[in-house]
Amino acid sequence: MSASVKDRSESRTGSQLREGNVVAVDLFCGAGGLTHGLLDVGVSVVAGYDIDEACRHPFEHNNPPARFIGRSVSALKGEELARLYPPNSWRVLVGCAPCQPFSRYTQGSSAASDEKWGLLSHFGRLAEESMPDVVSMENVPELERHSVYDEFVCLLSRLGYHVSPHKVYCPDYGIPQHRTRLVLFASRLGPIRIIPPTHQPKRYMTVRRAIGNLKKIDAGGIYSRDPLHRTSRLSDTNRTRIRHSKPGGSWRDWPDELIAKCHRKKKGRTYPSVYGRMRWDEPSPTITTQFYGFGNGRFGHPEQNRAISLREGAILQTFPRDYEFVKPGDEYRFKVIGRLIGNAVPVRLGEVVGKTIKLHLSQHGK
């Protein structure tokens, strides 16, 4: 996998802005997955905005010299963004507006009234007010079905941007997840073509290659040398269930007496992927904010009788193995850390975005 956070941080601090003039601001920055990928390929990131204060430590600790700004983009003005960019730099505005309102996992819920729907509109407003050279937005493919996406694209087009949306299947770029994302680029200079895939199907990064050499731990256990390599507890019933679970299987593999009442009903039978194990020699399922729970998806370890650990989830999101999510001495809370990891843009997808933008800008000298 990638080099350590420490090695890369030392090479960046104090030199990033002098070495290059491609400078980004990250909206909805979260724990820093997108920013980390951009920094890894030489795109300077001066700041990240997010309202979740739990993101502050992982963002700033792992991504110097980028600064975390705890403000909502709805209260942000373009003139503030414009002041962040150094003179004569290529100005890039990136972000992943919260995808829950558009995700297939939440369709049919109260998403229509969710205030997060408006955040993409604020992204567009900030692009209009600051007029960066390049805009990039990452989200779920389902976003394309909604009017807020059409309005976003139309606004960028009216402003003179060349809008280039791409569907990205993550394993094609070395990300060990069966995950497809919408990556949109918009440039004032011309259309942007995403870099070619780096991996063919026979060479996809698998669960085994990503996490197969981590230390064994039990359900509810913690590895002494890495406090993030910890797992949630299992009830006695779920311990029995996971022993009957097969890689790539589901609750349908269990003896009848172990099947939950909800799965005996007609509606419950349509959710075969919950209470499943991952397969060693394939990419993992999409890592969600609740990946640490055995009953929340196919998040069982391929052979150990437990759900995957927080560290394993982070690695499947292509964070470096020493990426720090919790300040030393603070409490490790599964729900909070799961949210930080599951909501993140995979680091390697951030690298793809950064390489694509740099290649595009290299063709338009400043």
Image (spheres, grey):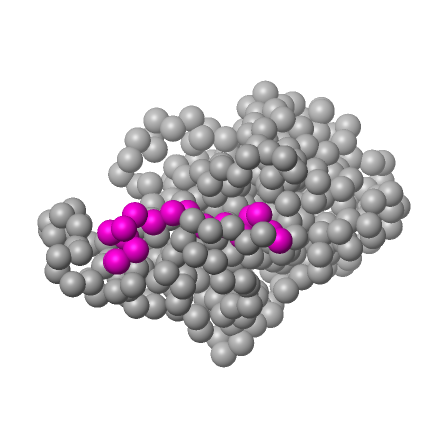
Image-based side of 298 in relation to 31, left or right? left
Viewer-side residue, 332 vs 60: 332
Which of the 4 quarters of the picture holds residue 116? top left
Q: Residue at x 71, y 56 (%)?
A: 4
Q: Quadrant of the N terminus?
A: bottom right
Q: Is residue 187 above or below residue 129?
A: below
Q: Is residue 230 magenta?
A: yes
Image-based side of 172 in relation to 2, left or right? left
As drawn, the residue found furthest toward the top would be 75
Viewer-side residue, 309 vs 141: 309
Residue 104 visible somewhere in the drawing: no
Residue 103 visible somewhere in the drawing: yes
Image-based side of 318 in relation to 47, left or right? left
Q: Position of residue 171 (x, y in %)?
A: 50, 65
Q: Position of residue 191 (x, y in %)?
A: 62, 54
Q: Which residues are magenta?
A: 225-241
Q: Position of residue 327 (x, y in %)?
A: 64, 37
Q: How many marks?
A: 0
